[in-house]
Amino acid sequence: MSSVPITAFLALALILFCIGLYGALTKRNTIIVLISIELMLNAVNINLVTFSKYGMTPAITGQVFAVFVIAVAAAEVAVGIAILLALYRNRRTVNIDEINTMKH
């Protein structure tokens, strides 16, 4: 059984986080922004599990935190999509620039 080095996991997490950050900061579509935030949370999960396994004191703590992050991410998506559906019914758009109902 070959062992994958810790740098491979950290590089994957870095790439995922950078893609998510780019999508969250540059895209105009709200659904793409939500997907980008999910990518960033998954990068955090990879780091948590990696340091849980390869850290100075390997324990299950990082994996438990990863499960909590997954639960929070699921709740975030559910609330975000519900808000998006309500805004789409009123405004007929999911473009971030055109959704300014919170200003009034």
Image: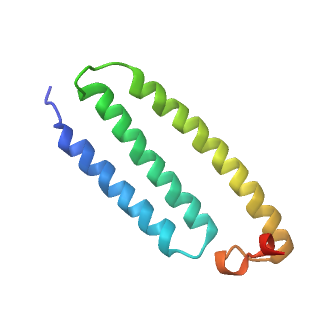
- Please give left or right for residue 58 compared with residue 99 in the image: left
Task: From this view, report whether residue 19 is shown above or below residue 7.
Answer: below
The C terminus: image quadrant: bottom right
- Please give left or right for residue 34 compared with residue 98 in the image: left
Residue nearest the viewer, comparing 42 with 55: 55
Task: Work out which residue is located at the far bottom of the displayed protein and give it.
Answer: 98
Looking at the picture, the colour scheme in use is rainbow
Residue at (32%, 27%) from the top-left corner?
52
Residue nearest the viewer, comparing 85 with 1: 85
Image x and y of residue 86, in percent: 82, 63
In which quadrant of the rendered view does residue 20 lie? bottom left
Task: From this view, report whether residue 98 is shown above or below residue 89.
Answer: below
Image x and y of residue 72, in percent: 60, 39
Residue at (18%, 43%) from the top-left corner?
7
Residue nearest the viewer, comparing 92 with 66: 66
Task: Work out which residue is located at the far front of the displayed protein and give it.
Answer: 103
Residue at (64%, 48%) from the top-left corner?
76
- Please give left or right for residue 62 compared with residue 37 in the image: left
Task: From this view, report whether residue 29 is shown above or below residue 34.
Answer: below
The N terminus: image quadrant: top left
Image x and y of residue 35, in percent: 54, 58
Task: Work out which residue is located at the far left of the displayed protein and give it.
Answer: 2
Residue at (66%, 42%) from the top-left corner?
75
